[in-house]
Each structure stands twice: as C-alpha cells, then as structure tokens.
Image (tube, rainbow, N blue to C red):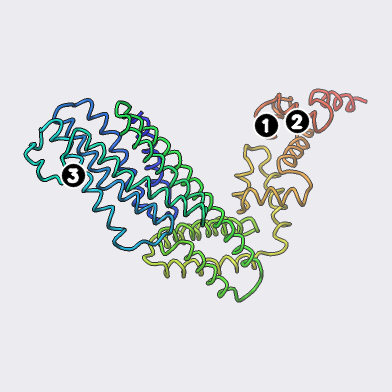
Amino acid sequence: MPIISSQLLLMVLLYFVVIYRGVLKGRNLFTISLAIFIAFLLCRSAQELTGGSQGLFLLYLRVSLLFSVGLPCLLSALFLQSKIDMHKLLWVAPYILGPLTSVIYVLSHDITHHEIFFSASIKPLFPFEPNRSTHRYTAMFGICSMLILPCLYLLYRQLIEAKSKITLSFLAGALCFGIFFLLSMFFFSFHWIYGIGAALLAGFWGWAVYLDINELKGKTLLLTEELNFLLRSGNKNIRPELRQMLENIELQSQGDIHHYKLKIRDILSLLTSNTIDAGGNKRELLDRNEAKIKAIAQSKDIQSVRELATSEMLELSEAIQNIPTNRSEHLVEKVKIYIREKYHEQFDTSDLAQQVSVSESYMRRKFKKDTKQTINQYLSEYRIEQAKILLATMSVTDTAFSVGFNDANYFSTVFKKITGQSPTHYQQDLTNNKFK
C-alpha cells in the first residue's frame, strides 16, 4: 500500500512542479510536504528490506523528516490557503514542536528497544520514565497537535465562513492522512494503514488542483470577453479602461509575476485568435503575438509586462478597426479562385486557410454564411463539373484522378450523389447523344 500511495503522491507532486502554474497559497510549502510524504512512504519499504541498524536509521530519518519538516510545512500551507491570520509565535510553534517530537520519538524508541544509537543511561534526561510505548504516544501527540486538531479547526472555519471547495479539498486530504496515521499507531500490527490516508490525500489534493485550474480558466475567459468587447467597441480612447482591467488581472495574480505573465500570455493569445477570426491577417498577427510573448517572458517586473500588454491590446484594437467591411466578400472569392486553380490537387481546408491568411474556423464560417454551402461541398461540385467535361474523352478512373480524387470508387459515389447517375451511365448518355 505505501508504494501505491507514494506513486499517487508523486503524480500530484509532478503536477504541482511541472504542469500547475496557478496561484495557490503556500504552493511551495505544499510541494515540500508532498516530497516529504513520498520519502516517508518509500523509506518504509527500504527500511523493511535492509533491517538491523540501517533499517532503524531509515525509521528515525523518515519520522524526523515527517515531524520536523513535513507536518510543519503542511500546517503553514493550510493556514495560508485558508487565509487565516496567525500570530508570529503560532507560525513558529510547529517548527519547534516538530523537531521536539522527533527527538523524543527517536530517543525513547532506541533506548527502550535496541540501544543501538543511544544508551539507556540517558533516561534521566527525560522528565518522565520512557517505556516501550512512549514513541507511539509521542507520534500520536505530534500528529494530533500538528495536523488533526488544526485541520478540524480550519474545516470548521471554512464551513462556517468561506466554503471554498479548493481549500476544503486540501483540508480533507490532510485530515484523512492524519486520521489514518493515528489509526496505524493504535493498531500497530496494521502499520500500513496510513498508506490509505496517503492515497486519499493524493485524491483530494489532485481534485483541489483541478478545481483551481478550472476557476483560473473561467476568470481568464471572462476577462478575455470583456477585453474583446472593449477592443471591438470602436472607442478611440480605451487606454484608461485597459489600465483598469490589467490592474484587476494583477490583483488576481496576488503580486506573483510568473502568474501575471501566464494570464497575460493566455489573454493575448485568445485576443489574437479573435482578431484573426474577425478577418485579420493570420501570419502577421501570429508572428507579432509570438514576439510579444517572448518579450513578456523576458520582462523582470510587472510594470514592464503591463506596458507590453497595453501596447499589444491597443494595436489589436486598431487592427480590428482597420479590417475592411467587405473583407468577407473578398475572402469567399479568394477561396473560390484557389479551388478553381487547384481542384485537381490534394489539399484540405487548413491549407486553404493558410493561403488566404485567416483562421480555418473563420474561413469555414464566412464561406458557409455567404454561399449557403460548405467549402467541401463547393469543391466536390466544382470537381464533378470538371469531370463531366473530361468524361467525354477519358475513362472513369483517369477522370477521377484528373479532378483530384485518389479513389475511383469514391469518385463514382460523389458523382452519383451530385448528378443522380453514375459516371459510366453519364458516359453512355454522352455517347448516345453524340450519334443521335
């Protein structure tokens, strides 16, 4: 069970470090605690394999890491995520209590069970008489004071006040780990039971990150729609409103320049796509967007990013205003001309869109709106019209390849669908009419 749980936690950790780029309160602390939990679980297997003094060393190492680093970091991250202010002394307390718990656990376990690293002569240093169960009670006290009780308190605050699904998921996962760890201390023969808690922790935290990403996407799309409406408004003086919207994005980023860059990059890409859909020059807009994104990535402060974003948005607004009203008519005619010139070759709509410098979706939509048929329908009809001419002097197979089909049977199917008769019957009709 620990191996499976560690793999699940590793997946969450990789998601945190490699993929996830949202603004999560205490993200680095969550990452550290995850890494410690994974090491705690994996070292259990190594501990059983080695045994002896090496096994004991691994036991003491994993317990020390868990209580001295893992749990204090997790507790700090949970309070940050819950947005609850604490006195500075309370922030420091877990980082004192954790190492103290580790020391008592290690010393009491070794001097009452093995005396490999420490001698029983240090017993007088304890304020109480350690016995063979002291280490277990110490671990139970540590997990309750640094995880279970704080999680219950934070859950209560969340349910009463904020009710954030993301924060509730993080708290629920941490509480599950704490409870199952406590149970493993009660039922020592089932020590592996905390692996179930670790698996639940991975599930809840993975769900929390998923919720956070969806929330981030929703806010980004809403801002993009507002900006897109502003850029299309025709208003010549949109700079003040742009400044206000960019300040709102900055507030959502909570001063994190990496997250601010990420949001600006996504928004500029969406606005560029919308400008292309409106009829803007695809190649020019994409090249400019790529250059802006590189410049934003190299920026050292939020002000520089804000200035670059404002400049690009003003240029996009001007580009939209300068798109001719008859652009769609010219576009449809360009598509028809390209089809008439290249109908005998193999190409798809993405190639066609590249030739006319607009997005494929915009081209499809405008062509259908103006001609009442799709591009593929127009292409097929034009090919069949040309095939009718060629069938007078060529075989069905040669005609099919000459008008752009690479399958004579498919050509026959399309021909019959459009004309109501097969190519062979059409040829026979041509021959009969010729000798009448």
**Relative height, residue 327 to residue 211 (above, below):** below
Left or right, 270 with respect to 188, comes to right
Q: Quadrant of residue 427?
A: top right
Residue drawn at (70%, 25%) of the image: 408
Where is residue 1 shown, x and y percent of the image?
36, 28
Question: Do the residues under discs 1 and 3 have CB atoms within 8 angstroms?
Answer: no
Q: Secondary structure at mark 3?
A: helix
Three-letter amino acid code of the residue under disc 1: Phe
Q: CA distance from mark 1 to mark 3?
A: 79 Å
Left or right, 197 with respect to 99, comes to right
Say the numbered circle drawn on residue 414: 2
Q: Secondary structure at mark 2?
A: helix
Q: Earlier in the sequence, mark 2 or mark 1?
A: 1
Q: CA distance from mark 2 to mark 1?
A: 10 Å
State whether residue 336 appears in this view.
Answer: yes
Three-letter amino acid code of the residue under disc 2: Val
